[in-house]
Image (cartoon, rainbow, N blue to C red):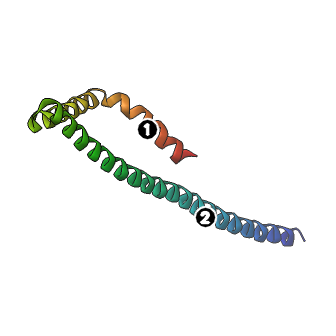
Amino acid sequence: MAFEELKNDLIGIKTDMGSYLEHSNEYYRLKIFKVLSKNTTGILKLLLIGISSLFALLFLSFAACLWLSELMNSYFIGFIIVAGFYIILAIMLYIFREQLNKPVLKKLSKYYFD
């Protein structure tokens, strides 16, 4: 009698463990899918916005070059001024690159650990 109850309990435990493992596997698959889909859509949005912004910046830079060229009566000087602005901007970004890492890491960890 006690042996039959122990046998039934062990069979029940085996069934429960199998169910637990199956549901855990499904949970982790869904969690991975969620993280991958968020990251993929985030990267896609970033690329689309980045490309659009890059084209806008390119045309605004040409407009600024031409405007400065008219003011200075020299195409060369207008383009050099705009190029100098971008060089100064690049140097500033390089100097403050460590301060730029912190907000990026916070944003990425928010997406990854949510």
The residue pinned by badge 1 equals 105
Disc 1: CA contacts within 10 A as few (<14), some (14-19) or many (>=20): few
In the picture, the quarter occupied by the N terminus is bottom right
Left-right relation of 83 to 41: left
> Residue 16 at what x, y percent from top left?
74, 66
> Residue 69 at what x, y percent from top left?
15, 36
Q: Which secondary structure lies at badge 2? A: helix
Task: Work out whether residue 31 or residue 58 is closer to the camera in this orientation and state it.
Answer: 58
Q: Which secondary structure lies at badge 1? A: helix
Task: Work out whether residue 107 or residue 92 is closer to the camera in this orientation and state it.
Answer: 92
The residue lying at 28 percent from left, 31 percent from top is 93
> Residue 38 at what x, y percent from top left?
52, 55
The residue pinned by badge 2 equals 25
Disc 2: CA contacts within 10 A as few (<14), some (14-19) or many (>=20): few
Left-right relation of 11 to 52: right
Q: Are marks 1 and 2 in contact (CB under 8 Å)?
A: no
The residue lying at 24 percent from left, 37 percent from top is 64
Left-right relation of 28 to 63: right
Which-is-in-front pick, marks 1 and 2?
1
Whether residue 20 is situated above or below residue 56 in the rendered picture: below
The residue lying at 67 percent from left, 64 percent from top is 23
> Given the image, on which type of amino acid does mark 1 rest?
Leu
Q: Going from the N terminus, do you reach mark 1 or mark 2 first?
A: 2
> Residue 18 at what x, y percent from top left?
68, 68
Whether residue 61 is situated above or below residue 88 in the rendered picture: below
